[in-house]
Image (spheres, rainbow, N blue to C red):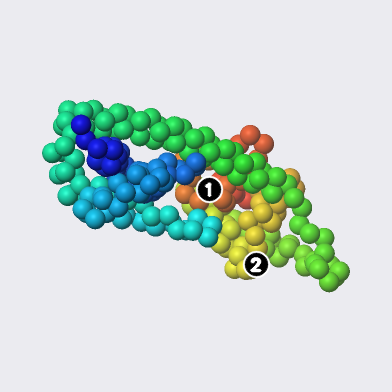
Amino acid sequence: MADKPTQLVLAALSRAVAEPGGVPLFGSKSAPGLFAATAVGRQAAQRCQDEGYLQLVRSETKGKSTVDYYTLSDKGLNHLLCQASPRELLEDLVRALEARQAQAADLLAVARQMQATLDGLKASAEQVLRQVPPAASVSDGTAAPADDGWKADALAFLSSWHASGASEDCPLPELFRQARQVEPALSIGRFHDGLRQLHDAEQIYLHPWTGPLYAIPEPPLALLVGHAIAYFAGPRLKMTA
C-alpha cells in the first residue's frame, strides 16, 4: 500500500487533470486546494513541485496575499497514467465534464435573463426620457435658447424631400442629421420632443417601421408613438381649394 504522501500526490494529480484552469496549491474554507495545509499535505505538495508534476498557470491577489493556481504538467500526467487506472481516470474526467456542462448551462440561463432585464430597463428608460420636457432654463438662471430653428428647417427639408419625388418619406436618422446642421448640440430626446410637437400641431406625418424590429438601421432614433414605432416623417400638405 502506498504511503500517505504518495496517496495525496495521486489524489491531487487526479484533481488537477480535471481542472485545466488551475487550482490553489493549498485549500481554504472558501476555495479548496490540491492539498490540505497540514504537515503531510505540505510534504506531498513539495514533492509534486520538486518532481515537476504541477505547473503554475496564474496568480491572483486577494487582499494582502497572493494565491497561486496550478494545473497538471505533461510530466505529472505521465506519472498519473503510470500510477492510476486509465479507466478510473477517464471516468473522473467524464464526471468533471458533465459537471462543467451543467454549470455552463446555468450561467447561460442567467446571462439570458440578465440580458432580457437590461433590454427591458433600457426600453423603459428610453420611453421615460422621451417624455421629459426640455429644461426651462440653464444653470445661470437665464432662459434656455428656443429650439424652433431646427424645427422650421426640418419642415423645409421635409417639403423639399417630398418635392424631389422620393419614393418614401424621410427616415428619422436622415432628418436628425439635417437638424444637427442647424443645431449641433441637439439631442435625440429633444429631437423626438420636437417631432411630437410638430405631429400634434398637424405639421408632419409620422409613419411606422413595418419590418422586423431587429432590422431597424439606427434604433435609438426610432420614435415610440402610442403603440407604434415611427421611423419616417413627411410633411402634412395643406389642401388647396
Q: Is residue 218 left or right of residue 176?
A: left
Tag 2 residue? 185
Report the label total.
2
The relative height of residue 140 versus residue 27 in the rendered view (above or below) is below
Point out which mark residue 219 bears. 1
Residue type at mark 1: give it. Answer: Pro
Point out which mark residue 235 bears. none
Q: Whole-percent x and y of residue 141?
A: 86, 69
- Is 238 or 52 nearer to us in this picture? 52
Q: Residue at x 24, y 55 (%)?
A: 50
Label 1: state its secondary structure: helix
Q: Whole-percent x and y of residue 211?
A: 47, 37
The quadrant in which the C terminus is found is top right
Q: Residue at x 43, y 35 (%)?
A: 108
Q: Whole-percent x and y of residue 78?
A: 15, 44
Q: Residue at x 79, y 59 (%)?
A: 135
Res 198 visible: no
Q: Residues within 10 Å of mark 2 (few under 14, many from 20)?
A: few
- Spatial distance from mark 2 to mark 1, Cα to Cα? 20 Å
Res 61 visible: yes
The relative height of residue 224 versus residue 102 in the rendered view (above or below) is below
The quadrant in which the N terminus is found is top left
Q: Whole-percent x and y of residue 224?
A: 63, 42
- Is 46 or 137 nearer to us in this picture? 46
Q: Residue at x 62, y 68 (%)?
A: 184
Residue type at mark 2: give it. Answer: Ala
Earlier in the chain: of badge 2 and badge 1, it is 2
Q: Is residue 217 left or right of residue 8?
A: right
Label 2: state its secondary structure: loop
